[in-house]
Amino acid sequence: MTAVSDGNEVRRSARSGATGLLGAAINGACGFLLTAVVVRAFGAADSGALFTAIGLVSIIGPLCCLGADTGLMWALPRRRSLAADGARLLPLALVPTASLALVVAGVGWVLAPVLGRAVLGAGGQHTTLIRLAFVGVPVFVVATVLLAAVRATRPVGAYVGLQLIAVPVARPLLIGGAVALGGSVVPGFGGWLLPLFVAAVAAAMLCAGPLGLRRGARLRPTGDDRREFWGFALPRALSTAIDASSMWVGVLLTSALADPAAAGVFGAVGRYALAGLLVMQGLRVAIAPQLSRLLGAGRTRAAAEIYRRTTLAIVLLSWPAYLLLAAFAPAFLALFGPEFAAGAGPMAVLAAAMLVNVGVGLVQTVLLMSGNSRGHLLATVAGLTLNVLACLVLIPAYGALGAAVAWSLGIVCENVLAAVLARRVLGSPLFGRTLAVAATAALTATGVAAAIGIGAGGRGPAGLVVALGVILLGCLALLADRRVRALLGAVRSQLRPVDKVEVPS
């Protein structure tokens, strides 16, 4: 491949990344709004119950997906013709996963009284909430698999519009409406689940065209399809559940080993920590299919360049946010009410761990799109094991703080292992001098602004406003530098349309 072709790939990733970042920003804002609506409307104890129900779906749903969603993301971009041989993968991914989810939902419905007492305590409302959570598992699975097909076959805007904008915008509106009508946590959870059902229907309509379903495309998979697809997907099945449940493991164990109020505090803090990942999530959404295609064609140089550029963007945009979260944790938690003031310590701990998480970039995506789902599983299992063991030791004594320390240990363990394996895939260094200089500058500048804010107004809202004002003034001052303006011009050029990329033959 030529240098021009590799350059087009980088520009393509920049354009897709901009779309993904926009969707991730909206998703993160709506996720925060959702958490604020829940904790304000239901208080610490009831919000802990609602977070627990969401956690059940977030853990069991990905497990029932059997890795098929990521399997579609990996396999479909490598197909020569989506309509000719890509359509066969959809029933291969959808039928086993939906069937398993229905079985799990039935078992969960029967066992709901026992499970409700175990994690939430006695109460008819708790049983109903657990049952509704299990009803949500098949909805989650079908929506996740179909949205993965959209992500692999349509321009990134289609997936972003559904998963990162429509669903998160609808949830706080529906939950807020349920609360305004006097509803409890049960209709509140219904407001969380309903947008997923609508998204599943829309995703089915969107992927039907590219896969040739309206033209009678062949849907019966071959033996080679089964071996290739499930050989990749099954190792991913467990790691998917671990990825989705990383926070919810702490919520469930905190509810069981401490109390629902502590689980509510940890759930609120965890939402802040995950919201800070919006840059990484947006870029992952945008470039995963591209990485699969490039690595499948052996174009590791172009893949490595895209990885390094996205890592630089992630660090520059995310590290300042996490440093501010740690420095001004009381200010952020004040928005949830006085019950959540105890979350300041856990938030600072998680913010430090997330600096590592975002600092290594999209190493998990590189592993998966290279086909090394087993290596990714190794890293996630190691992180989860450390997380759970630390939870069992720390939560009884320290509550939400113990859960935050445990999750942080798991985050660091998983990312270090994944980075080592991703380095082998790309065959070149993951980081360079440019990233080191940029990361140091971002931390130093944000640290100075935070120190000024704390000195002027403490760690509360007043100090946060001062720190943000200092950062804004610093950014405006940078625009006076000719080199900075030239850099912004180069970024704009990367967002212009690119030539059509060659399809591997």
Image (cartoon, helix red, strand yellow):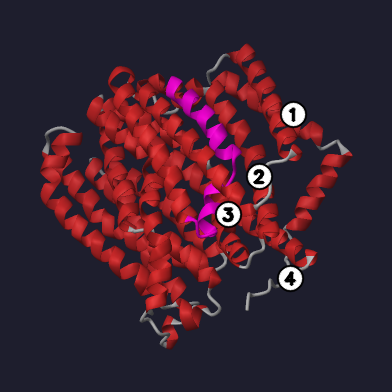
Name the kind of residue labelled 4 in the image.
Asp
User: In the rendered image, which residue does mark 3 sit on?
Assistant: 20
Marks 1/4: CA–CA distance: 38 Å
Asked if marks 1 and 4 touch (Cβ < 8 Å), the reply is: no
Question: Vertically, is 42 above or below 500?
Answer: above
Marks 1/3: CA–CA distance: 27 Å
Q: Which of marks 1 and 3 is nearer the N terminus?
A: 3
Residue 434 drawn at (x, y percent): 75, 39
Q: Is mark 1 on a helix, strand or loop?
A: helix
Magenta residue check for 446: no
Q: In which quarter of the image is residue 181?
A: top left
Q: In this view, does 409 lie to the left or right of 128?
A: right
Residue 193 drawn at (x, y percent): 31, 53
Tell me which residue sits at (54%, 17%) in the image. 459
User: In the rendered image, which residue does mark 2 sit on?
Assistant: 430
- For this orientation, the residue located farthest to the right is 482
Magenta stretch, main secondary structure, is: helix
Marks 4/2: CA–CA distance: 27 Å
Q: Is mark 4 on a helix, strand or loop?
A: loop
Q: Quadrant of residue 66?
A: bottom left
Name the kind of residue labelled 3 in the image.
Gly
- For this orientation, the residue located farthest to the bottom is 216
User: In the rendered image, which residue does mark 4 sit on?
Assistant: 499
Q: Which region shows up in magenta? A: 345-372
